[in-house]
Amino acid sequence: MQLDSFIQAVWNYYSRNKRSFPWRETLNPYAILVSEVMLQQTQTQRVLIKYADWLQKFPTIEALARASLSEVLSSWSGLGYNRRGKYLWEAAQIMRNQYAGVFPSTFETLRKLPGVGDYTANAVLAFAFNQPTVVLETNIRTAILHHFFAASGDEKIADTDIKKILEAVVDKKNPREWYYALMDYGNWLKSEGHQYFHKQKQYVKQKPFKGSERYVRGYLLRETLANKKLYLKDVKLIGYSAAQIRKVAADLAKEGLLRQIGRTTLTIV
């Protein structure tokens, strides 16, 4: 499909099926950063509730920077990958202390914030500052693969090839709305059964949550935050040895999410 006809197909779909999300109704870069970090590897419906609660509790960079880590992690609970909450908290402190509370607006400064990778930096620039960056996530990837690489047989397509297409089709006057349109279009394609995981060179299948270390991490963090202290000898999880539980506990302490006393006890930071 030619570039022009692809662009028209995306805009045509979006004009009739535009989705509404609270993070699309704001230009506040802090609120947009929160949404982007929450949406990483987390379903939209789960994020919707947490997003509203988070902004009510931490409405500004200053409010988040003032909070304790245990408050932040308690508010994050239920979203998974708890390091993301800690990264947001650390980023807020950096913006308050180093940038006088002013949100950074360049790719280089955004990338220096904890937990902000290339995608998140580019997404914030596009959605908060309307800059024509290259934003590539799962729905957008689906749209590009469907229209430009579906007939490529068993060939694995690299993200670098997809980004070349994105650079050619991005709406330089209104990249914010263009990427919303592209996300909605790609989401619709997936709902219609067009899945292209098998064509992605970078795709790595996620392991099941149950039975993984992520399950133990979530349990230990949740119980420690709720009780302020957790004795590892009291933790009994079917399918996990005491040694595995101690290892995960040590990892949580090493990452600064919890504090460990000896090898026996976890407490909040």
Image: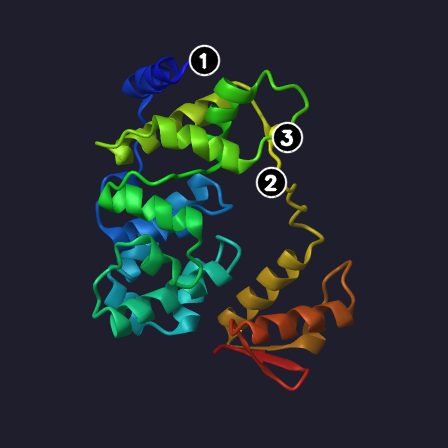
User: Mark 3 and mark 2 in contact (Cβ < 8 Å)?
Assistant: no
Q: Position of residue 269 (x, y in %)?
A: 47, 78
**Camera sees residue 38:** no
Q: Secondary structure at mark 1?
A: loop
Q: Secondary structure at mark 2?
A: loop
Q: What is the three-letter code of the residue carrying label 2?
A: Gln
Q: CA distance from mark 1 to mark 3?
A: 19 Å
Q: On screen, 194 above or below 52?
A: above
Badge 3, how many Cα within 10 Å: few under 14, some, many 20+? some
Count the marks: how many? 3
Q: Earlier in the sequence, mark 1 or mark 3?
A: 1
Q: On residue 258, which mark appears?
A: none
Q: CA distance from mark 1 to mark 2?
A: 24 Å
The residue at the far bottom in this view is 262
Q: What is the three-letter code of the residue carrying label 1?
A: Met
Which residue is painted at 72% across and 62% down in the image?
Answer: 237
**Quarter placement of the N terminus:** top left
**Which residue bears the numbered disc 2?**
202
Q: Position of residue 60 (x, y in %)?
A: 24, 61
Q: On screen, 147 above or below 126?
A: above
Q: Secondary structure at mark 3?
A: loop
Question: In the figure, is residue 209 to the left or right of 84?
Answer: right
Q: CA distance from mark 2 to mark 3?
A: 9 Å
Q: On screen, 265 above or below 180?
A: below
**The quarter of the displayed image where residue 167 is located:** top left
Q: Position of residue 59 (x, y in %)?
A: 25, 59
**Which residue bears the numbered disc 1?**
1
Q: Position of residue 261 (x, y in %)?
A: 60, 85
Which residue is painted at 50% across and 27% down in the image?
Answer: 142
Q: On screen, 77 above or below 198?
A: below
Q: What is the three-letter code of the residue carrying label 3?
A: Lys
**Which residue bears the numbered disc 3?**
156
